[in-house]
Image: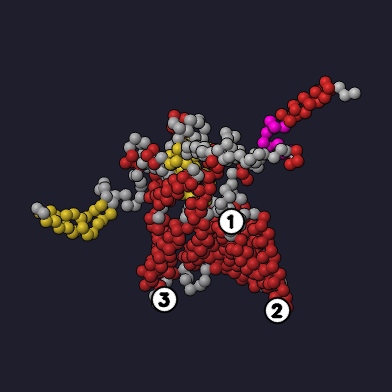
């Protein structure tokens, strides 16, 4: 016998289950088609609007930002002005591409570096993101510094990189993009997505990657040539003239130099300037070893031809060891590498002149003096290159000035060596040539030296442009120096004038 109360309880449970299934969220798995009742008619669009028909949500307002003018040092204002102007326009465009609303009305006019405390104070008092770039010239490279001060915050985000001038635009855009990305990622500086990579990998730009071992070709070429020279020197030092031994030694030496250079370039990041600096430590000491032995010890040797090549190898090994030790102190600039080569060349000439002056005979080749001069000149210039920040144009200008000064003085003093000159006349000619060389180098170095910084008061903007240079008192002007006005008639006034401040 069927109990009607029992059936009533089961019907109630079934109705409750159907009600819960109808109230399930839309993301739940739908019931099978057989269990779903077919609708009597399709719903009208008015009854169930589609997501596309809904009004779009308002976009968040763009963050306001101010890009300050690129600050430069007062002593480098003229040289860095074109780079700073181009960097201003680039950072403003990059900020807009990153979704920032750049406020041009809030920019300052002077290219003065704002202190970090003042920058944080400005940002804390306002609601705008302040972007403060600054750059300094470091030889052929540029040291770029970007500081971001978020509005309302009391902390700064700073990034500094030293890049080549040709890569300044790309690196500046990458640095600004990474700083803005870190700012959007939260106070901890972690980008969205929960990346746990270290900052050395996470903060690196992805648009451009600096080339690794850009001086690989230079290093390989010099190492291959020097390896062949080592093979030839070994063959000559052994006293053998058999070509069946010479060519295998040349091939083995060149191959060892090639393989060693490739391994070094893969293991360490060797720049173009680094490679040329190592080349200077290879060739100039090798040449110095040959010349010193030929001039000082060849007369006392049993076989000077053999021992001369061994002396050259000893000098080259010592030079390349010292050059590698110098590179451990820091990166080498192109100006520093050129300075090392220039020191070897100028030392070679001055050493020869010194031996001529000591011997009083300009008809003999001063091998020993040239060797000592090349060795000492390269050593002094290489040591200075690791400490000084010079440009290649300055070094080249000094070399040209020394060459012109020496040749000019030698030409003016050439009557002293006409006919059969005495030792005193020859020494006078050598002294005049050396003095002209040094004077030409000194004048060229003085003219091309960087401007010295002048201490200025922040309240006096006119003093920031003051600098100490060879033309600080002005220059003569030839041409139109004024205008003559008579009624409505105007005429230019031609003549000679002086443009600048007269002391």
Q: Secondary structure at mark 2?
A: helix
The main secondary structure of the magenta stretch is loop
Q: Which residue appears at 34% of the width and 52% of the height?
A: 470
Tell me the residue at 49%/35% (across/down). Answer: 150
Mark 3 is surrounded, within 10 Å at the Cα level, by few (under 14), some (14 to 19) or many (20 or more) other residues, namely: few
Q: Which residue is mark 3?
A: 420
Looking at the picture, does residue 67 appear above or below residue 336? above
Q: Quadrant of residue 21?
A: top right
Question: Do tag 2 and tag 3 residues touch (Cβ < 8 Å)?
Answer: no
Q: Residues within 10 Å of mark 1 (few under 14, many from 20)?
A: few
Residue bearing the label numbered 2:
243
Name the residue that disc number 1 marks.
211
Magenta range is 21-31
Number of labels in the image equals 3
Hey, which residue is sitting farthest top in the picture?
A: 5
Task: Please identify the quarter of the rendering in which residue 36 is found.
Answer: top right
Q: Front-most of 268 and 17?
A: 17
The percent coordinates of residue 266 (x first, y second) are 66, 57
């Amino acid at each position: 016998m069927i109990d009607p109360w029992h059936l009533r309880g089961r019907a109630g449970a079934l109705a409750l289950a159907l009600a819960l299934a109808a109230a399930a969220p839309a993301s739940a798995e739908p019931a099978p088609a057989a269990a779903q009742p077919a609708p009597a008619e399709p719903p009208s669009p008015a009854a169930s609007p589609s997501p596309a028909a809904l009004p779009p949500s308002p976009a968040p307002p763009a963050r306001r930002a101010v890009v300050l003018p690129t600050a430069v040092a007062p002593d480098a204002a003229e040289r860095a002005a074109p780079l700073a102007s181009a960097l201003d326009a680039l950072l403003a465009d990059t900020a807009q591409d990153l979704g920032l609303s750049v406020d041009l009305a809030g920019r300052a006019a002077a290219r003065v570096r704002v202190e970090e405390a003042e920058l944080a104070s400005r940002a804390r008092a306002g609601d705008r993101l302040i972007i403060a770039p600054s750059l300094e010239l470091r030889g052929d490279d540029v040291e770029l510094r970007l500081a971001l001060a978020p509005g309302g915050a009391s902390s700064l985000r700073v990034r500094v990189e030293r890049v080549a001038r040709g890569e300044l635009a790309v690196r500046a855009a990458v640095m600004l993009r990474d700083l803005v990305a870190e700012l959007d990622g939260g106070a901890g500086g972690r980008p969205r997505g929960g990346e746990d990579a270290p900052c050395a990998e996470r903060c690196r730009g992805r648009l451009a990657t600096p080339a690794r071992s850009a001086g690989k070709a230079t290093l390989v070429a010099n190492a291959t040539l020097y390896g062949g020279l080592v093979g030839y020197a070994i063959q000559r030092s052994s006293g053998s003239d058999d070509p069946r031994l010479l060519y295998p030694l040349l091939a083995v030496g060149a191959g060892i130099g090639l393989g060693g250079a490739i391994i070094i370039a893969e293991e360490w990041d060797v720049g173009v300037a680094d490679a040329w600096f190592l080349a200077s430590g290879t060739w100039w000491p090798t040449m110095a070893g040959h010349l010193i032995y030929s001039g000082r010890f060849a007369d006392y040797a049993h076989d000077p031809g053999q021992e001369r090549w061994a002396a050259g190898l000893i000098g080259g090994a010592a030079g390349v060891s010292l050059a590698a030790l110098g590179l451990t102190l820091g990166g080498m600039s192109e100006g520093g590498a050129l300075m090392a080569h220039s020191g070897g060349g100028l030392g070679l000439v001055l050493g020869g002149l010194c031996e001529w002056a000591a011997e009083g005979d300009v008809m003999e080749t001063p091998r020993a003096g040239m060797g000592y001069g090349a060795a000492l000149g390269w050593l002094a210039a290489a040591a200075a290159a690791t400490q000084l920040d010079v440009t290649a144009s300055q070094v080249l200008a000094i070399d040209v000035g020394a060459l012109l000064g020496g040749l000019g003085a030698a030409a003016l003093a050439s009557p002293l060596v006409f006919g059969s000159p005495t030792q005193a006349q020859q020494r006078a000619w050598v002294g005049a040539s050396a003095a002209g060389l040094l004077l030409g180098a000194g004048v060229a170095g003085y003219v091309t030296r960087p401007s010295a910084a002048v201490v200025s008061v922040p309240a006096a903007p006119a003093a920031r442009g003051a600098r100490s240079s060879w033309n600080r008192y002005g220059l003569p002007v030839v041409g139109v120096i004024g205008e003559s006005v008579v009624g409505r008639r105007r005429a230019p006034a031609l003549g000679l004038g002086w443009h600048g401040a007269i002391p």
